[in-house]
Amino acid sequence: MEHAFWTQRWSERQIGFHEGKPNALLAENIARFEKPKLRVLVPLCGKAEDLAWLAARGHTVTGVEFVPQAIQEFFAEHALTPARGADGSLAAAGVTLFAGDFFALDAKTLGTFDLIYDRAALVALEPSMRARYVAHCRSLLKPGGAIFLVAFAYDQTKAPGPPWSVAPRDVEALYAGMRIQTLAERRVSTSARLAEAGIEALSETAYLIAS
């Protein structure tokens, strides 16, 4: 996990991955799997608006983020004064955020979850780290829990990530043994860097992956 890289991205405000609003695929599809009062984990969460949006729907939300600046900005932008837990977390209004390496936080610290919401985590990791990441996520799922994954796919030969391309075949291989349902797919605009490489759009797909 390249802490220096992501810290620099936040410091230089190169945060095009921050949508600034709830993710459309999450909002459009949550009714298909939502149950009252889910315990939700958001790995590599940044300051995503999805955190507050899920909490406002009555869910208990836990996020993990490398960069403390992102966590500070989340609470500041929502005019919240968080309480600090004995485990180092910051919490307010149904959202608890941990600053640190996702792989260093296990179920003893985080607990287990009904739902893992992954919009910008898997696609941010180099392919060599994916299997370890998926295994760690699965260790944090409650029995019967699910993962709502949003992934991008594009021609990786034209440009490196992040975001890294995660094609449907990659999802099938990574989550082998789980039930994988494709909920929605859409074309989205790309960054200036990828556009310069000849990638005009990304395929964004939402998956529901059940244990």
Image: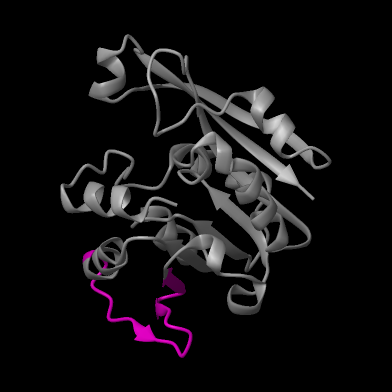
Q: Residue furthest left?
A: 12
Q: Residue at x 28, y 16 (%)?
A: 195
Q: Is residue 8 magenta?
A: no
Going by the image, does 72 lie left or right of 35?
left
Of residue 131 and residue 74, the one placed in the foreground of this image is 131
Q: Residue at x 55, y 24 (%)?
A: 185
Query: From what the image shows, is residue 93 above or below residue 134?
Result: below
Query: From what the image shows, is residue 89 above or below residue 112?
Result: below
Where residue 104 sits, quadrant-wise, is bottom right
Residue 210: image location, x then y, percent: 76, 47
Q: Can residue 59 be seen in the rendering of this structure?
A: no
Q: Residue at x 42, y 56 (%)?
A: 45
| Count of residue discs | 0
Going by the image, does 36 lie left or right of 152?
right
Going by the image, does 104 lie left or right of 183?
left
Q: What range is drawn magenta here?
A: 77-98
Of residue 52 and residue 125, the one placed in the foreground of this image is 125
Residue 131: image location, x then y, percent: 65, 43
Q: Residue furthest bottom?
A: 86
Going by the image, does 153 lie left or right of 134?
left
Residue 12: image location, x then y, percent: 15, 47
Which of the colour schemes (rainbow, by chain, secondary structure, one colour) is used?
A: one colour
Q: Residue at x 28, y 25 (%)?
A: 191
Q: Is residue 82 magenta?
A: yes
Q: Can residue 20 be seen in the rendering of this structure?
A: yes
Residue 163: image location, x then y, percent: 41, 33
Q: Residue furthest right?
A: 177
